[in-house]
Image (spheres, rainbow, N blue to C red):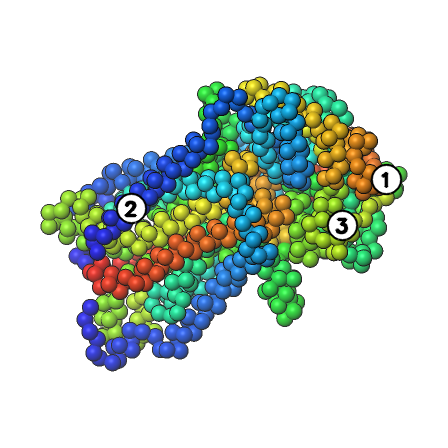
Amino acid sequence: MTRHVPALSRRAVLAYGIGAAGTAALIAGARPVRAQAPVTLVNVSYDPTRELYRAINDAFARHWREKTGQQVTIRTSHGGSGRQARSVIDGLDADVVTLALAGDIDAIAQHSRRLPADWQTRLPNNSSPYTSTIVFIVRKSNPKGVKDWSDLAKPGVGVVTPNPKTSGGARWNYLAAWAYELDRTQKNEEAAKLFVEAIYRNVSVLDTGARGSLTTFAQRNVGDVFISWENEAHLALKEFGEDKFEIVFPSLSILAEPPVAIVDQVVDRRGTRAVAQAYLDFLYTPEAQKIIAQNFYRPNRPEHADRVDLARFPQIRLVTIDGVFGGWSKAQNVHFSDGGVFDQIHRPGAASR
Amino acid sequence: MTALTLPSREWLRPKPSALPGFGLTLGFALSYLALIVLIPLAVLVWRASGLGLSGLWAVATTPRVRAALETSFYLSFAAALVNAVFGLVIAWILTRYRFPGRPLVDAMVDLPFALPTAVAGIALAAIYASNGWVGSIVEALTGLKIAFTPRGIFVALVFIGLPFVVRTVQPVLMDLDREVEEASATLGAGRLQTVLRVILPALVPAILTGFALAFARAVGEYGSVIFIAGNMPFISEIAPLLIIVQLEEFNYAGATAIATVMLSISFLSLLVINLIQSWSRRRFGDV
Amino acid sequence: MSEISNPTVASALSEPRWVRWSLILIGLAYLSLVVLLPLAAIFTEALRKGVGALHEVFADDATYSAIILTLTVAAITVPLNLVFGVAAAWAIAKFEFPGKSLLITFIDLPFSVSPVVSGLIFVLLFGAQGLFGPWLAANDIKIIFALPGIVLATTFVTLPFIARELIPLMQEQGTAEEEAALTLGASGLRAFITVTLPNIRWALLYGVLLCNARAMGEFGAVAVVSGHIRGLTNTMPLHVEILYNEYNFVGAFAVAALLALLALVTLGAKSLLEWRYGDALAGKGRH
């Protein structure tokens, strides 16, 4: 027996060696050298855009091959918008970023200088090829009779929304509620604060991201109303069943503009500026605008989208972040920074009901 | 067993051991440890030190941070305690008894190590939610919710901590000399006496190690907890989540500060338990 | 081992039948509640849409490259930590030196460091804004958001497993047998191979299997340094999260089930082997 054991461990070492060599060969084999070098783009995006960009990437690859004959592969990375921005700041080589809010791309510009501060002026519509807004998902036949933001603040209504500290989408949710009360009370900030506080008193689970939060609502059966991106609401109905949930459109909501940008430092070093620029420009073309509407985002140029898709976007009064809150950086500072309004809502006395 | 008859004092430092390889193995172990663990952690502390000691203290004593730290430490302690008891039972039945399916049970113990923490969190939340297999039963019987309350955090921490106790106790138990037990029995000791006076003292270091590791692991746990915790500030919010929150605000100083505080507290508790353990080893000897 | 003929001594060597079975029942009930149920939940979810749906998941290129990446990371990490574990355990268990408890505590440290922090420290070191960031960028060396970063974070997290498995056992065993071998003229290396290694083989195997399982399952730390690029820097646990977030629950749980299965099969095989040959080994090996 004493002789058996060293043999065993030697075999184990050998097995590892073969395994490692095999993988190395596989990796090397996966990158054949070709005459017309294919190009790869990395698109670092936020959570709800997975389905959208899967469709866009296919369409763009076809478009680019027809135009230039070059093969382009787009790799995507998805996650919470803030976390994705931080990864790019810390060195993740994204050719393009397509995030949930301008504030996150501002942060990249400010902290890493990988793109200029005026990035948002480089593409039409504040660099947002599509927009969305905030709506509610309720359980089938709306048992709690939720019609508008004011219903969310009533006692006994269970509200599900992620933590605005970790989720970009949740920040839009919060600001939309704030804007509603501000509008109703003719700009009474104190009333707005109490109103938002009342809504968060009805929240019993603060997930870190929008998708985890929706799973809590849909799969774990927590709460009566889920505050959601409009595009996610439609997708959720598709995924979890239209017989289980309904979408409720509030009387007023916020115009969410998820922006896109080229990361100059990366495209210049990798030599991918032309294709990256074409990729973002492609988002504004009729073909992409149609795909955008199909994936439940509101297109910039609705004339290119199918009428069936557009019928899903009812007219809601939409306010903008610039109009009500004076831009992202100000909203971020007042509401979501350390010790900001959101933290005050959750002071010990307020949290224990 | 001649070495054991030597009084332990004589073993302390000057007496050179007859065995070779001390310099080589210690040297390698230290350099490797420094490269992978110590230097990176030092950078963390160095980044946090930008705040100064008073700054660190200010971060650690924010009501929100303090509440989260208390939640993390209190629940981790409880979970480790439960695991110490049941982990010992499981290690015992695995090494001492034969029953059908034992190899499979043995393999199952390690599952919490192997499963990605996020998967564990998702699975646990599904089971212990109000509409889950266990959650629905518990709620019908007692009216208590498990998932999305601190009880949910406790469940997740118990899950991830289980293997630590079993796997530190098991090898020692397996290697324990039956002859000592036989001697004890021959000398007229009852079974309970033998277990309590002979076997348990020999296991104490391993149990303590397992407890300490389960505790320390639980304090820092993130992936499995966030899915089941509810994450409500002052109620079910854990300290690692606050680090993430700080990072989301690009506040590296704040994040490293909370991390450093957590690191120091768990380092100290580990150190204390390791000291107790080496003390008990010297006291009880190697059996 | 001597035959025990005295009946009272024999009874004092094992527990009464009822104690035995209640211990087994308690242990199994606890394990079922904590480990078996989550495992069952994972497999139930994975098989919800039948076996055909599984094919779709594993035919996906992204899943394939995630599996390859995970195996590569484990193949680099485990041998490194194996060498470290044996060296550290030898130095700690066979020799007395001041600061030993401190050293053990440092080895334990990665357990107690939150996975979030384990990733963060490498970002602080090698990130674009980190200590070596500018130098790495100037020389076009990629560490984080690439394979080296994932390997580093995984090595950090799994560093204690093998060492921690070996240390209590080797301490328990003392140095007598190795000293005897040396007295008989064996070289240090030979004493290690012929005396120490057989004594620690099961613990060593445990350690390697655990380290491997954890290396493949690590989520939190890797999530920070991976960058989550589909098909490029996604490990299996991260791929699980991605699938889950795409509402592809079947796919997510299928990959999770594969991870669990990998762990169960290796660990089960080990248990079986040990079970089959355990008795033969128990007779020899120890004394």
Q: Residue at x 56, y 19 (%)?
A: A271
Distance (Cα) linking label 3 and label 1: 17 Å
Distance (Cα) linking label 2 and label 3: 57 Å
Q: Which residue is mark 1?
A: A315
The location of residue A111, given as percent across then percent down, is 60, 26
Q: Which residue is mark 2?
A: A11
Which is more toward the observer, B181 or C193? C193
Q: Which residue is mark 3?
A: A137
Say few, some or many: other residues with alpha carbon within 10 Å of mark 2 (under 14 / 14 to 19 / 20 or more).
few
The image's mark for residue A218 is none
Q: Residue at x 81, y 49 (%)?
A: A248
Q: Residue at x 39, y 55 (%)?
A: C267
Instruction: Determine the image quadrant of residue B75.
Output: bottom right
As drawn, is B115 to the left or to the right of A81? left
Dot 3: chain letter:
A
Q: Amino acid at mark 2?
A: Arg
The location of residue C118, given as percent across then percent down, is 48, 40
SS at mark 1 in the image = loop
Q: Amino acid at mark 3?
A: Ile
Dot 2: chain letter:
A
Instruction: Determine the image quadrant of residue A78.
Output: top right
Q: Amino acid at mark 1?
A: Gln
Give the mark nearest the N terminus, 2 or 3.
2
